[in-house]
């Protein structure tokens, strides 16, 4: 929790702390430069959780921060939240330097940390009221009921936090992060342990906030969730940024395609002429073929099938998804040193290929 007893109103120009350097009209939601974090482990060894991250989150984006366990996502987010001190680097939140203009930087951001931190003795509604008070949100500007509704906790408004289920507590944390209408909302795995229906409800609300101009940054291990929601995605691995692109561009890196056909007649086996497509037979009529779209067009694959004497009654194609890109990048990096990502060969990812 960020204890800020600051007024929500605009500061007067006389306030010397507000006479900071001029800000650009539309600063990026987040600018992170050379962000480094070293932890000292119990044995005294240094763990470099963030190795000089440079990252810009455009204003108004729905931004995914992905990475395997231990990549450094929460460390980065906790630095944004003021829960962890950075070792080096610079962070600007909505144009405000987190170190030099802390108060305005913190008012511009709402963070839902991965770790659940709730006062067990506050009922849900009161927890939101107290949080709004800490941020100096005037009573008439509070939207406690709306937030409880948005996170599906209206019925639990008077329930003590300690009596809420794990998923409910996480949703209460989300509501708490939103009380001061931050320009940037950062959610560290907000849907871990949240059931499907409420997860969708939460995302609908986040989409609405985003449509109204709020920048949303999230981490999640549900990659299909990130693929569906985020317009831009960064991937961090072992404390370093290994990708940061628009989601469509990231997905466009996938070179592997799969064609599934259903033959009109039973097949004895895979025709030898189709072996170059890694053809595999499932059942007696369903044949799956794989190819690199940068090298072979679908017409060529279909012609090869026809020449093999197979009559097609149905077909479908499938491209890789974010999970394929993610795994390709992570595997390309593992043990590969600090160089650029290698092609994720086992997945047929050609990472040098540009989207078409
Ligand atoms: N307080 C701490 N003291 C020492 N090491 C820490 C501390 N917090 C995190 N680390 C280490 O920093 C690295 C990054 O951890 P972090 O929690 O940021 O990863 P993450 O990407 O959020 O992972 P996950 O997906 O599991 O949440 C890990 O090696 C972790 O062990
Ligand atoms: Mg984490």
Image (cartoon, rainbow, N blue to C red):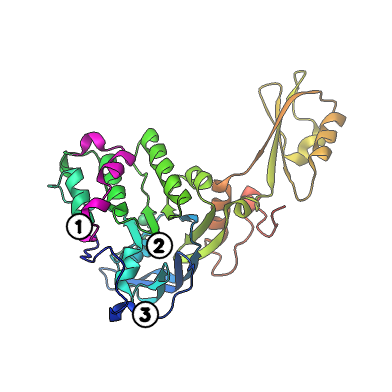
Residue 186 is situated, as x and y percent measured from the top left of the image, at 38, 56
Earlier residue among tags 1 and 3: 3
Q: Are marks 2 and 3 in contact (CB under 8 Å)?
A: no
Q: Residue at x 37, y 50 (%)?
A: 189
Q: Quadrant of residue 38?
A: bottom left
Q: Nearer the viewer, residue 76 or 134?
A: 134
Query: How far separated are the C-alphas under marks 2 and 1?
Result: 32 Å
User: Magenta region, mostly helix, strand or loop?
Assistant: helix
Q: Residue at x 29, y 67 (%)?
A: 82
Q: Secondary structure at mark 2?
A: loop
Q: Quadrant of residue 130?
A: bottom left
Q: Which region shows up in magenta?
A: 133-157
Q: Residues within 10 Å of mark 2 (few under 14, many from 20)?
A: many
Of the numbered discs in the image, which one, if any, rests on residue 133? Answer: 1
Magenta stretch: includes residue 150: yes
Residue beneath disc 3: 20
């Amino acid at each position: 929790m960020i204890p800020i007893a600051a007024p929500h109103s605009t500061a007067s120009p006389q306030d010397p702390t507000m006479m900071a350097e001029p800000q650009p009209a539309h600063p990026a939601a987040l600018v992170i430069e050379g962000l480094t974090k070293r932890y000292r482990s119990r044995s005294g060894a240094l763990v470099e959780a963030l190795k000089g991250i440079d990252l810009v989150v455009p204003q108004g984006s729905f931004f995914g921060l992905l990475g395997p366990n231990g990549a450094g996502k929460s460390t980065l987010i906790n630095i944004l939240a003021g829960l962890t001190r950075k070792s080096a680097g610079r962070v600007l939140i909505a144009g405000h330097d987190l170190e030099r203009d802390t108060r305005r930087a913190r008012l511009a951001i709402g963070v839902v940390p991965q770790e659940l931190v709730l006062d067990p003795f506050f009922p849900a509604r009161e927890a939101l009221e107290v949080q709004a008070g800490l941020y100096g949100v005037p009573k008439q500007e509070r939207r406690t009921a709306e937030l409880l509704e948005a996170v599906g906790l209206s019925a639990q408004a008077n329930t003590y936090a300690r009596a809420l289920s794990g998923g409910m507590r996480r949703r209460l944390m989300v509501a708490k992060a939103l009380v001061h209408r931050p320009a940037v909302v950062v959610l560290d795995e907000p849907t871990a342990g949240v059931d499907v229906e409420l997860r969708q409800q939460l995302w609908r609300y986040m989409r609405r906030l985003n449509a109204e101009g709020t920048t949303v940054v999230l981490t999640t291990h549900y990659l299909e969730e990130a693929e569906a929601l985020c317009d831009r995605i960064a991937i961090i691995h072992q404390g370093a940024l290994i990708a940061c692109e628009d989601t469509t561009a990231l997905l466009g890196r996938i070179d592997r395609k799969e064609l599934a056909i259903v033959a009109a007649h039973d097949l004895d086996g895979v025709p030898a002429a189709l072996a170059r497509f890694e053809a595999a037979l499932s059942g007696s009529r369903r044949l799956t073929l794989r190819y690199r779209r940068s090298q072979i067009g679908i017409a060529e694959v279909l012609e090869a099938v026809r020449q093999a004497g197979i009559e097609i009654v149905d077909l479908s194609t499938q491209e890789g998804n974010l999970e394929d890109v993610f795994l390709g990048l992570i595997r390309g990096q593992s043990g590969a040193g600090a160089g650029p990502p290698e092609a994720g060969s086992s997945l047929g990812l050609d990472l040098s290929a540009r989207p078409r």
